[in-house]
Image (cartoon, rainbow, N blue to C red):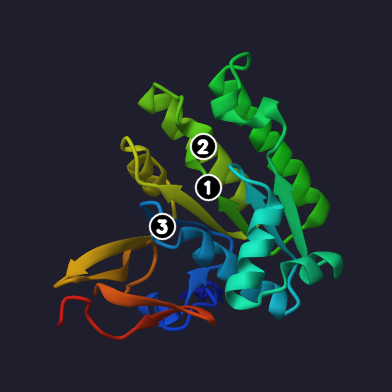
Amino acid sequence: MEETTIPERVSTGIKGLDEMLKGGYFKGTANVVSGKSGTGKTIFGSQFIYEGAKNGEKVMCIITSEESKSIVREMKASFDWDFKKLEDDGLLSFVDITDPGLRLQKSVEIAPSELIKSFKKLIESKIDDVQPQRVFIDSIEALFLAIDSNYKLRTLIDDVFGVLRSRDVTSVISVGKMFGLDEMVEYGADSVIKLERVRVGNNLQRTIFVMKLRGSSTINEVRVLNISDNGMSVLAQSPYLE
């Protein structure tokens, strides 16, 4: 019999989530966190790379819709995570897509597909240069909104995910819920985690569930997602119990 290699797992850094994933993400996979605005996608991805940097890993944050200083300020104020120090120590690298030529919604001269190809080449170059073990892209929909062909969209999404997988980095990619784009991005991912808010009586409750994880079983429950001064954690309880 041939010897079977057990794939290496990577901790998400979010208490209670590794349990739902039966051990964390698989190393070298592209993992999507999906949800509406305000559900915690940026915190989720930031906590993922912060976990790696705390353990001495090189990590990278690729930002498509705001400047890195906004995330640095938000994470320091909310959770006392010092991203600036991690950057100074060479553990965290930021890639700000601030050039108007790489801002999809502000560019009228570059065809959207060519813009995404430029983005792909940029992240290829940055990852090859820095060689991070974890990457967080926040958020991907800004690049794909103007693609009107579903076939072309699927191909371009696969191309971007392929760059990440081929470099053997474990990545988290956030996507907002809009115009069905989230479903296309989720389809190409190795795992999908959904963040939502549900109304329970007079309260709004944050929730989390694992929609898919290729190659592994998961805990198929909707659980409470808590955000405190220490970051995110998953509680082993249903949000629907008053």
Instruction: Categorize mark 3 by other alpha carbons within 10 Å: few (<14), some (14-19), many (20+).
Output: few
Total numbered labels placed on residues in the image: 3
Q: Nearer the viewer, mark 2 or mark 3?
A: 3
Mark sitting earlier along the chain (2/3): 3
Q: Residue 142 carries which label?
A: 2
Percent across and percent down for residue 118 are 67, 29
Q: Are marks 2 and 3 in contact (CB under 8 Å)?
A: no
Residue that label 3 marks:
38
Q: Which of 67 and 21 is in front in this view?
A: 67
Q: Distance between the residues labelled 1 and 2?
A: 7 Å
**Of the residues shown, which amino acid type is indicated by label 1?**
Ser
Q: Distance between the residues labelled 3 and 1?
A: 13 Å
Q: Which residue is drawn at 72% across and 68% down?
A: 83
Percent across and percent down for residue 25 are 49, 69
Q: Do the residues labelled 3 and 1 touch (CB within 8 Å)?
A: no
Instruction: Categorize mark 2 by other alpha carbons within 10 Å: few (<14), some (14-19), many (20+).
Output: some
Percent across and percent down for residue 182 are 37, 44
Residue that label 1 marks:
139
Taking the view exactly as shown, the residue that stands out farthest to the front is 202
Q: Nearer the viewer, residue 28 or 125?
A: 125
Percent across and percent down for residue 200 are 17, 72
Q: Which residue is drawn at 70% across and 37% down?
A: 98
Image vertical order of residue 187 relative to residue 23, above or below: above
Q: Residue at x 61, y 64 (%)?
A: 74
> In which quadrant of the rendered view does residue 221 lie?
bottom left
